[in-house]
Amino acid sequence: MVRLSNGYATHFTPSKWKYAHATFYGDDSASETMGGACGYGNLFNNGYGTNTAALSTVLFNNGYGCGSCYQIMCVGSKWCNRGRGHGPTSITITATNLCPPNWAQDSNAGGWCNPPRAHFDLSMPAFKKLAFWKAGIVPVQYRRVPCAKKGGIRFSFQGNNYWLLTTVMNVGGAGDIAKMWVKGSRTGWISMSHNWGASYQAFGQLGGQCLSFKIQSYSTRETIVAYNVVPPYWSVGMTYQAKVNFR
């Protein structure tokens, strides 16, 4: 069941195009992109693949940018790849990591992720879809786009019976999260605090109860309710999938 705060379902619409730059980190295996500040763990196993990026501080937004999706085009560089119509190639990526500031370098000479710059540090496979890798850095246009996800939102559990730490993955629509609540079969709705990245926590005795979640999108402020996602015999280290998602 889905309940939206404004009473009706809407699709997340793309934003206007803006300008930034893109670099890459790691190698063709994309192994260095695993984990990351959003807490998604193994990006292959969890459905994110290699079309991912570490965002600069401004775009990362203290973790509230995790899960957001961007369409990116390489523009204005001889290193840009060309598509079938000889126009710029575009890719869609998901934000999975933070590109931290480098205060030892100027923002225009190595400190690419320093505030207030908007910057994308892509996985190497993603960067190579846009441009020749030897370029190192290329100018891009970017815009927010809906995250097209298969299936429902997923909840990965850590913690214990008295402290629940949940990483939220596979979020559709805007892809981002502003607030979360959890409800046990013997409790009311409990507000969860933002721990880090895409992880939220609740303190309380929730063991042995069937759990439901309520999630509010950061960008659209819509709220989705996923009832009885988790069985009463839940355990940490497991991931549970809802039947609902944002659009």
Image: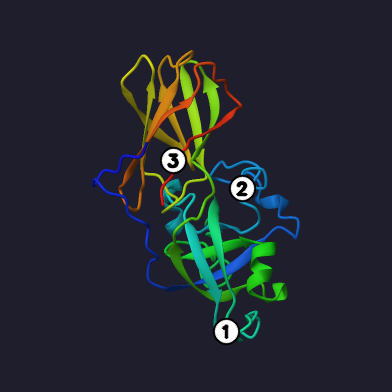
**On the rendered structure, is 69 left or right of 91?**
left
Measuring from the top left, give residue 127's x and y in whole percent: 65, 67
Which residue carries the number 1 mark? 87
**Color style of the picture:** rainbow
Q: In which quarter of the image is the N terminus?
A: top left
Which residue carries the number 3 mark? 244
Instruction: Using the rendered view, name the quadrant where residue 88 is placed.
Output: bottom right
Residue 187 in the image: above or below residue 67: above
SS at mark 3? Answer: loop
SS at mark 1? Answer: loop
The type of residue carrying mark 3 is Val
Rounded to the nearest angstrom, the CA distance separating label 2 from label 3 is: 17 Å
The type of residue carrying mark 1 is Gly
Nearest to the observer: residue 21 or residue 156? 156
Rounded to the nearest angstrom, the CA distance separating label 3 from label 1 is: 37 Å
Q: Which mark is residue 47?
A: 2
Which residue is rendered at x = 58% and y = 62% of the image? 121
